[in-house]
Image (cartoon, grey):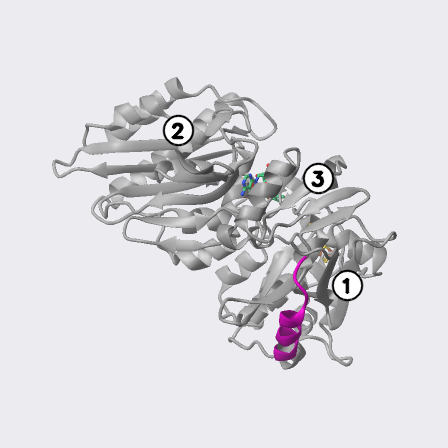
Amino acid sequence: MNQSQAIYFYWNQQLIVIDFSQPDSPRPSTTVLNWLRSQQHGKGTKEGCAEGDCGACTVVAAWPDEKGIMKYHAVNSCLIFLPWLHGKHLITIEGLADKGNLHPVQQAILDLNGTQCGFCTPGIIMSLFALYKKGTSNNREEAVLAMSGNLCRCTGYEPILNAAMSIGGFNTHDHLAETEAEIIGKLEELPEAPVIINHPEQLYIKPANLSEAINLKKEYPQAVVFSGGTDVALAQTKKFIIYPELIDLSGLKELTTFTEDISCWKIGAALPLEEIAKRHNGQIPMFDTFLKVFASKQIRETATLGGNIGTASPIGDTWPVLIALGASVVLSGSNGDRTIDIEDLISGYRKIAILPDEIILEIVIPKPAAEKKFKFLKLSKRRQMDISTVSVAISFTIDNKGTTQDSVLAFGGMSDLPKRATNAEQELNGHPLSESRIEKVCRVLQDDFRPISDARATTEGRMILAQNGLKKCLLHILTLKNKPTHE
Ligand SMILES: Cc1cc2nc3c(=O)[nH]c(=O)nc-3n(C[C@H](O)[C@H](O)[C@H](O)COP(=O)(O)OP(=O)(O)OC[C@H]3O[C@@H](n4cnc5c(N)ncnc54)[C@H](O)[C@@H]3O)c2cc1C
Ligand code: FES
Ligand code: FES
């Protein structure tokens, strides 16, 4: 096991070494934002909400992909702990201009009046910088998605979107491109990441492989496990809880795979959602739809399926989708692996049936028959960057007699758990799909749920949303009856 306690990364063009064994070293779970602003005078990166909602703290982290090509990822520095930076190139707003010349993205914001008070501007520029490095077209939708995690209170989004679209044209050239090969070479030469950081305030464990992770989980049963940390970090930034023991699964090879065979897709529990979006390539039903409305681009760069399952949130977006897809989850522990149906995994409000020495290894999604119908809908107050009030994911087949069979109607936000509407399913099965049948099914939904009233919606409001959402999904499928509907 690597005994070193130091992490190495590049910040703009500078090599940074943080040796956590030194007496004045920061706590490992110090966020990148706090380290930048409090310890490096990197004040260009702003703090707004400290919970991933505003994008003021956006920075870009770059590292080579499996083909050795440098990829640039816009992330929320307020939710990322320092050890995540090991082996990466951190780029902040201070690193964009070159010898007194603004970066093309900065120039576009200036030329098209995309800033007023300027508080949000560094974060917006970093999101657009990641978009620029992707080699973007002038597509408005792409610009909106890139900006989905950035709030601006005074400029208004139109000038910012105009600037975003003006940088299109698949040009990725800038001064960073000139030193890219050199940086990749330097990143490759960095020492391995430390496995155990024994800081006076915190034990931070970043296992190098799965068996090490399981052994360490057994050795430290109280340790909090995390992958993307978009949920776990909030306990620190919002509730000021400092976890004494953390096990960081991000980047673990066995948990970041994406494989496909004739019968299923297998997705590593710690594979970030943005990676899933790229790798599944539009194949898995409903994934493109939910991934576009899940949080923001910055959150999806680190958040994972395993983490969403781990939170067991009644309003977690992936649960209804995975239930409608008939997914199962592989748990890995000291007694080996076991596979559990996604519906059996949830054991109570925000609880999953996982043993103390187990971690979520992967999610298995069976490939559906071609005639299977799917539809996902998320109902929230904003299209981007909002948690669901209610979400619905449905699947069923229409047999050769035109009768609906095997329906799964899964809901988030309607109960203390993500749950199927079994009465409504019965009302749907065994009948031809028609407008009058859809009306009946939606009415019966009242027998399935008695949702809570809270800040997002009242009991009645949630029921109306669920009924209308289900109706919309079913009518969509009815209209496109003979075509595949995989949204
Ligand atoms: C601004 C913001 C917006 C958000 N928007 C949405 C949204 O639109 N929809 C939505 O559903 N959620 C949303 N979330 C919640 C969160 O981003 C998701 O739940 C995300 O999928 C969590 O993944 P993660 O890897 O970051 O989880 P982590 O924070 O790493 O972990 C979350 C939980 O899962 C456990 N865990 C993680 N990995 C494993 C593993 N491999 N094995 C066992 N347990 C594990 C952890 O112990 C922890 O309890 C949002 C969060 C923020 C901050
Ligand atoms: S400070 Fe608001 S997203 Fe990080
Ligand atoms: S320019 Fe003021 S918040 Fe965006």
Please name the residue that numbered disc 1 is placed on.
17
Q: Is residue 129 left or right of residue 45?
A: left
Q: Looking at the image, is mark 2 or mark 3 nearer the viewer?
A: 3
N-terminal of the pair, mark 2 or mark 3, is 3
Q: Tag 2: residue type?
A: Gln
Q: In this picture, which residue range is highlighted in magenta?
A: 181-193
Question: What separation in Å lies between label 2 and label 1 (alpha carbons)?
Answer: 55 Å
Q: Quadrant of residue 391?
A: top left
Res 155 seen here: no
Return the residue at label 3: 245
Could you tell me which residue is drawn at 39 percent across and 41 percent down? 376
In this rendering, position of residue 108 left or right of residue 318? right
**Circle 3: residue type:** Glu
Residue behind mark 2:
467
Q: Check disc 3: other Cα within 10 Å, few if <14, some if 14-19, many if 20+.
A: some
Between 419 and 185, which is closer to the camera in this rendering? 185
- For the residues labelled 2 and 3, the Cα–Cα distance comes to 44 Å
**Label 3 secondary element:** strand
Q: Quadrant of the N terminus?
A: bottom right
Q: Earlier in the sequence, mark 1 or mark 3?
A: 1
Q: Are marks 2 and 3 in contact (CB under 8 Å)?
A: no
**What is the C-alpha distance between the residues marked 1 and 3?**
22 Å
Element type where label 2 sits in the image: helix
